Amino acid sequence: MNIWHICMFEIRRILRIRSVLLNLFVLPLLLIFILGAALSSTMDTGKDNVPGQVRVGVIQTGSDSGLVTEALNAFVAAPAVSEMMKVQHFTSEEEAERDLRQGELDFAVLIPPDLEERMAKGEEAKLQWILGKDGTLNIVGETLFTRFTDELNRHMATVEVLGPEASMAMASMTDEGSADFSYVNVSNSGTAGTSYSASQYYAASMLAMFMLYAGMTTSNSLFSERDKKTLTRLQAAPVGNGVIFAGKIAGNSLLAFMQALIIVLMTYWLYGVNWGTHPWLIVLICVLITISSMMIGVIVALVSKSAASASALMQGIIIAMTFISGGFTPIAIDFVQRIGEFTVNHWVLQSFLRMMLNASMSEIMHNILMLGVVSAVLLAIAAVIYGKVGYRYE
């Protein structure tokens, strides 16, 4: 008896369990269909989510002349910017706030009266925002005017470092021939004009989640041998504990990879999910998910006292990682996103989405590399725990 025999026996044993087949192969396809159909109106091609022209109020209580004012006028008159926002000028903050409350403005910018004086002293140029009711339009307004202040600070730094002769760089901002502010670009991630649909998003997230459930199958399988007292029989055979353990992991790994293959192919044929143009990278990602899934299952099985506690712990880990990574719904909270970067699901989802968007190879490989790092860490932790605890009947 060797690893291959144990592996094949494990696959045949699991394939006889109808509930496992249902959870691993049928349920993910059903969830992808339901979530993709239900949320297609809010996450389809992304075209419906492009905000319209932002109505911006510019509040200037100080002098309406000067270098900053001229630069601001050139900025809002630039074709790329004027297509995205419509500017109204105000001399008092109260007027702008009233229009914001009445819905006549979407966003307002307050220019401090001493801004030019502070910039002359070498201080950073900052504007004050007054937010409107629409969060998306607020983000657009903040992004545009942050880009404006960044450019102001860049020119002021140039003047400070290179001397007074570099002031021509500031003057060029207001020249009629160069006031197009070409540094303002409007684009999507990846190939311009493309985005992922709800079916693509949930195909990637559900694939990650249900492949992790293959790790729970591994955990249950390891406990099953103990509970049924069959582990002692295996240990009586002329094979080591390591061979038994590796054979069971190999069997569940092949099953998990089979699960990934079925989900990818079935979503492509049935739901039209575009997984990108790098099939071998899809295979690599699935291999890394399989490693992570098996190692999480092994860690949980070795540190838990019973099959029930291992199953509960595994369920909690999978659900928590899927939620934090945005697998159920995209989460815009920055703190949660930072935590999500420590999960397997986050890097799996980002790797697949980057391929679906036809992003650059360097961007795709960055996410795959991070997934590989997470898998390697889990593998190291599992190896350490196995070395201390081992797989045996106690």
Image (cartoon, rainbow, N blue to C red):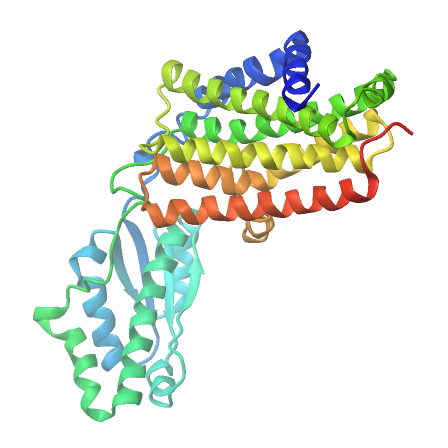
**For residue 192, what is the image quadrant?**
top left
Is residue 134 visible in the rendered image? The answer is no
Q: How many marks?
A: 0
Residue at (69, 11) in percent of width and height: 13
Q: Is residue 335 above or below residue 47?
A: below
Front-most of 5 and 21? 5
**For residue 193, what is the image quadrant?**
top left
Which residue is most to the right? 394
Which residue is most to the left? 177
Residue at (27, 42) in percent of width and height: 191
Residue at (62, 38) in percent of width and height: 321
Please give left or right for residue 229 compared with residue 243 in the image.
Answer: right
**Which quarter of the rendering shows the C terminus?**
top right
Q: Is residue 296 above or below residue 7?
A: below
Q: Position of residue 149 (x, y in %)?
A: 34, 71
Is residue 80 visible in the rendered image? The answer is yes
Q: Is residue 218 above or below residue 74?
A: above
Please give left or right for residue 282 compared with residue 23 in the image.
Answer: left
Q: Position of residue 320 (x, y in %)?
A: 66, 37
Q: Position of residue 182 (x, y in %)?
A: 18, 62
**Which quarter of the rendering shows the N terminus?**
top right
Q: Position of residue 252 (x, y in %)?
A: 63, 23
Front-most of 383 and 174? 383
Front-most of 156 and 366? 366
